[in-house]
Image (cartoon, rainbow, N blue to C red):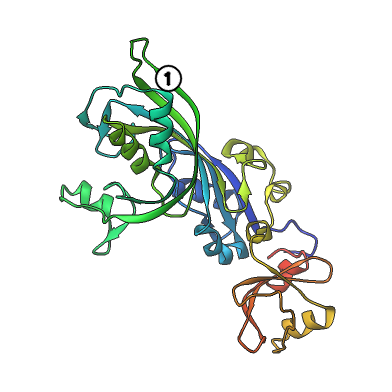
């Protein structure tokens, strides 16, 4: 493509609709942008909706730095039944009376799930066992069990609840916002909260609102992306560096940028820079890629944006 043409490297913050698999949404976006390389920043279950970062072009090389970041969701839990998928789409496997509830009991119960907790992922999950996702074994009728693992819940904030008119009231539904670490299954969290209250529960609705440094303020629906013209569609993309702002920056001088592009080695004498991955930033603020300093303070490149992307030239 010619210089000045719309750039197709970046991240589309997609509002995935309920009923779509993450991969189906990804492939639809990839076709609309006419790119070969595309990936997403963390699978959402088909039932779930909300933020699905779709990485396009050279941005795919940085997706791994986002997958491990914190995520936030708004979840609705329905009490009285458990299902074989731990959500509303599964068959009922257990019923229990609705839990009697009061403010103190609810607050104490939710507080137990903040911090590092142990949970068992649902059988219907993409976790692999003997080379296949667990859901494949489950659909084959095999008796499988996901191993327990430790995950982190940073915060769990109650939004609303609905109860019966009985005395004492019984909890029917709970809506909360959860900020959690990578690898947390909200379906398992819903089930565990139900059991902790002496009842049964499943996840009724889920919306993701944040993935790492990406939030929902610039989110786009599939319909909006579809309606947009090919010329204007790249304007919907968010620069990849927005996902990496949690990393420290190495601000390079003009001569250092030239040496970097030529593949030359040089040292950085900035004591504030740690040994981990850092953003490489040009004098004009442009994002060059990622690098890190070795023990001798020599800059080692991890990822480098191609020349055309750095200069605003499309592939």
**Rendered location of residue 224, percent (x, y):** 63, 37
Q: Residue at x 26, y 33 (%)?
A: 82
Judge whether 233 appears above or below 310 on screen: above
Q: Quadrant of the C terminus?
A: bottom right
User: Vertically, is 98 above or below 307?
Assistant: above
Q: What residue is rendered at 72% in x and 87% in y?
A: 267
174 and 33: which one is in front? 174
Tally of marks: 1
- Taking the spot 38% from the left edge, 47% from the top edge, the residue there is 185
Compared with 234, 99 (above or below) is above
Q: Would you place residue 257 above or below residue 237 in this image?
A: below
Question: What percent of the width, then of the height, locates residue 126?
Answer: 34, 53
Classed neighbour count for the residue bearing mark 1: other residues with Cα under 10 Å, few (<14), some (14–19), many (≥20):
few
Asked if one can make out residue 221 in the rendered structure from this viewpoint, the answer is yes
Q: Can you tell which quarter of the image residue 279 is in?
A: bottom right
Q: Is residue 208 left or right of residue 58?
A: left
Residue 89 visible in this rendered orientation of the protein: no
Instruction: Please identify the residue farthest to the front as the structure is shown.
Output: 104
Is 86 on the left-hand or right-hand side of 107?
left
Position in image of residue 207 (x %, y %): 50, 37
Nearest the camera: 226 or 79?
Answer: 79
For mark 1, what is the residue?
162
SS class, disc 1: strand
Quadrant into which the N terminus falls: bottom right
């Amino acid at each position: 493509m010619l210089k000045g043409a719309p750039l197709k490297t970046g991240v589309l913050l997609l509002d995935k609709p309920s009923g779509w698999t993450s991969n189906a949404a990804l492939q639809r976006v990839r076709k609309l942008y006419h790119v070969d390389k595309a990936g997403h920043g963390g699978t959402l279950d088909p039932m779930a909706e909300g933020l699905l970062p779709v990485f396009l072009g050279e941005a795919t090389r940085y997706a791994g730095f986002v997958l491990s970041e914190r995520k936030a969701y708004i979840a609705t839990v329905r009490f009285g039944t458990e299902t074989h998928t731990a959500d509303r789409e599964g068959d009922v496997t257990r019923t229990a009376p609705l839990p009697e509830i009061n403010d103190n009991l609810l607050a104490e119960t939710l507080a137990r799930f903040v911090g590092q907790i142990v949970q068992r992922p649902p059988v219907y999950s993409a976790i692999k066992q003997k080379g296949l996702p667990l859901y494949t074994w489950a659909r084959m009728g095999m008796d499988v069990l996901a191993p327990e693992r430790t995950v982190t819940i940073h915060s769990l904030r109650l939004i609303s609840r609905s109860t019966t008119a009985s005395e004492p009231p019984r909890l029917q539904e709970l809506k909360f916002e959860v900020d959690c670490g990578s690898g947390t299954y909200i379906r398992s969290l819903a089930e565990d909260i139900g059991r902790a209250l002496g009842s049964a529960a499943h996840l009724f609705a889920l919306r993701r609102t944040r993935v790492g440094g990406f939030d929902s303020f610039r989110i786009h629906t599939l319909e909006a992306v579809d309606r947009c013209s090919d010329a204007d569609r790249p304007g919907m993309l968010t620069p990849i560096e927005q996902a990496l702002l949690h990393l420290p920056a190495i601000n390079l001088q003009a001569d250092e940028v030239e040496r970097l592009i030529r593949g030359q080695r040089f040292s950085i004498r900035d004591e504030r820079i740690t040994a981990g991955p850092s953003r490489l930033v040009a004098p004009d603020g442009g994002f060059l890629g990622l690098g890190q300093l070795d023990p001798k303070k020599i800059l080692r490149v991890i990822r480098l944006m191609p020349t055309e992307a750095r200069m605003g030239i499309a592939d």
